[in-house]
Amino acid sequence: MGATATRTQLRFDTGRTSLDLVAAAVPGPGTGSGAAAGSPERLVEWLRGAGLVPRGAEVPADGAWSRRFVELGAVVARLVEARLAGRAAGEGDVKALNDAALASPPAPRAVRAADGTLTRGLAGEPDCAGLLGAVARDALDLLTDPVAAGRLRRCEGDGCTLVYLDTSRGRRRRWCSSETCGNRERVARHRRRAVATATRV
């Protein structure tokens, strides 16, 4: 999705739903700068893009939903920062994550489409606590799995703070996205070479 001057893009390239929430809901360089928290409509767009609700499902989101997702995103961000820094996680943040994870995510249901194929639906109307629970469980699984947590990386792009899960072969991924930060780095490298060549002439 391309960004515009008035609409910040939503990011889904971190490798985990909980990290995608941090990218979308926690303002900061390299993140979505609160893109999912700007309005209930944007939050619903993020929920659909993250695969937490099917595209056609009605989501009764309101401003309270947005605030709660921002709060959970901030909790996950602090827990991830603690893991990357090698320090103990904050007791309050651990409790907040555990409390959020208690709610059962909305149950999926197979729905027959007009052409007879099966598509994904929900057994009932999605609620805020259940959707928060799905994200919290993803974060809990990530942060309590030593192998997965050991693959957390911060983007090396200039000014980017986004954290992603490095599942690349050889664990040598350097950027949150090759198309964004990776491309900017390649362009900057090309310009530096062009300037160096011009000064030698």
Image: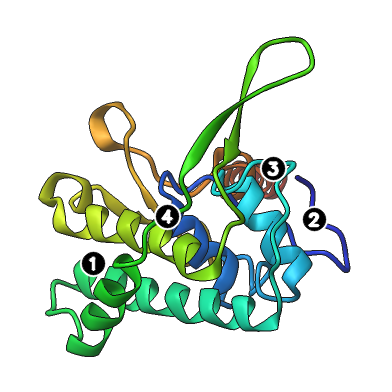
Q: Do the residues labelled 3 and 2 touch (CB within 8 Å)?
A: no
Question: Is label 4 or label 3 in front?
Answer: 4
Q: Mark 4 points at which residue?
A: 105
Q: Residue 26 carries which label?
A: none
Residue type at mark 2: give it. Ala
For this rendering, which residue is in front, 57 or 194? 57
Dot 2 falls on a residue whose secondary structure is loop
Question: Is label 3 or label 2 in front?
Answer: 2
Neighbor class of circle 4 (other Cα within 10 Å; few <14, some 14-19, many 20+) is many
Q: How far apart are marks 1 and 4 (CA)?
A: 28 Å
Question: Is label 2 or label 4 in front?
Answer: 4
Residue type at mark 3: give it. Ala
Q: Which of marks 4 and 3 is nearer the N terminus?
A: 4
Q: Earlier in the sequence, mark 3 or mark 1?
A: 1
- Above or below 183: residue 163: below
Residue 192 in the image, given as x and y percentages of width and height: 62, 49
Residue at (49% x, 61% y) in the render: 131
Residue type at mark 1: give it. Leu
Q: Which mark is residue 194?
A: 3
For this rendering, which residue is in front, 100 or 184? 100
**In the shown orientation, is residue 117 left or right of residue 139?**
right
If the image is split into quadrants, where does the N terminus sit? Answer: top right
Q: Which of marks 3 and 2 is nearer the N terminus?
A: 2
Q: Residue 3 carries which label?
A: 2
**In the shown orientation, is residue 51 left or right of residue 116?**
left
**Where is residue 78, by image quadrant?**
bottom left
Q: Name the residue under label 1.
A: 84
Residue at (55% x, 39% y) in the render: 178
Q: Distance between the residues labelled 2 and 4?
A: 30 Å
Dot 3 falls on a residue whose secondary structure is helix
